[in-house]
Image (cartoon, rainbow, N blue to C red):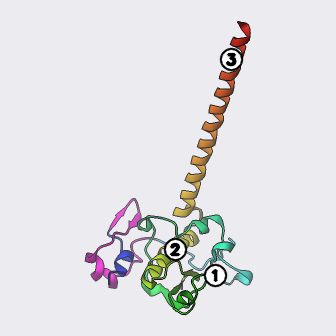
Amino acid sequence: MHLLQWFLLPQKVAGGRPRLQPGPQQAELLSMSTSGFFRWPAPLARMCTAPWGLGLRGTPALLAPGAAVTAVQMAGRRDHPALLPPLDERDLEEQFVKGHGPGGQATNKTSNCVVLKHIPSGIVVKCHQTRSVDQNRKLARIILQEKVDIFYNGENSLVYKEKREAEKKKQERKKRAKETLEKKKLLKELWESSKNVH
């Protein structure tokens, strides 16, 4: 029951966006529908031309980190899933498969890799970041939550907004560094010219 407490219904809605808060008091709210708390775009079954949404022939592609765009690669690395719209557990299909990668028999023989599919959008997430099934389930839901936000909201999603803010801060830092360098260069020229006068 404690696992579901992290992915429950929004407790407070501030600024039009649902806000999730963990806690045992929301456990009885699981039977309620979450569709009334936020609005999805009208055409739910729209075609997505982005490379992370569809594979060849318009079929949903597995969202592997290597084949995804930058914003999707950023998905799953947020500290605040509370700002994202909640996932309905009835829309999720969950499988446990054998692990992969380094670790030998401990990873290759245990089924602790979580494959989570969001049925309405067709987005699939595979999470094998830890050896714990419970931890992988939590992480898979956070990653899927962000990828669903990208799928439905596109440029207005939280991941894209944070990417734009980071790019803006980077440009500001570069601009300040350039100005500082120009000031140092000018100061050096003034110092050398004053040295030559004497």
Q: Nearer the viewer, residue 31 or 127?
A: 127
Q: CA distance from mark 1 to mark 3?
A: 60 Å
Q: Circle 1 sits in a helix, a strand or a loop, which is it?
A: loop
- Outermost residue toward the bottom in this view: 109
Q: Badge 1: few (under 14), some or many (20 or more) residues near its Cα, within 10 Å?
A: some
Q: Earlier in the sequence, mark 1 or mark 3?
A: 1
Image x and y of residue 117, in percent: 54, 85
When the figure is inspected, residue 17 is found, relative to residue 134, above or below; the finding is above
Q: Which mark is residue 62?
A: 1
Quickly name the residue at label 3: 190
Q: Which callout, 1 or 3, points to the residue nearer the camera? A: 3
Q: Earlier in the sequence, mark 2 or mark 1?
A: 1
Q: Nearer the viewer, residue 146 or 128?
A: 128
Image x and y of residue 126, in percent: 56, 82
Quadrant assignment for the C terminus: top right
Q: Earlier in the sequence, mark 2 or mark 3?
A: 2
Tag 2 near tag 3, CB within 8 Å? no
Q: Nearer the viewer, residue 181 or 59?
A: 181
Q: Which callout, 2 or 3, points to the residue nearer the camera? A: 3
Q: Which residue: 27% across, 82% down? A: 28
122 left or right of 3 in image: right
Q: Which residues are magenta?
A: 12-38
Q: Is residue 36 magenta?
A: yes
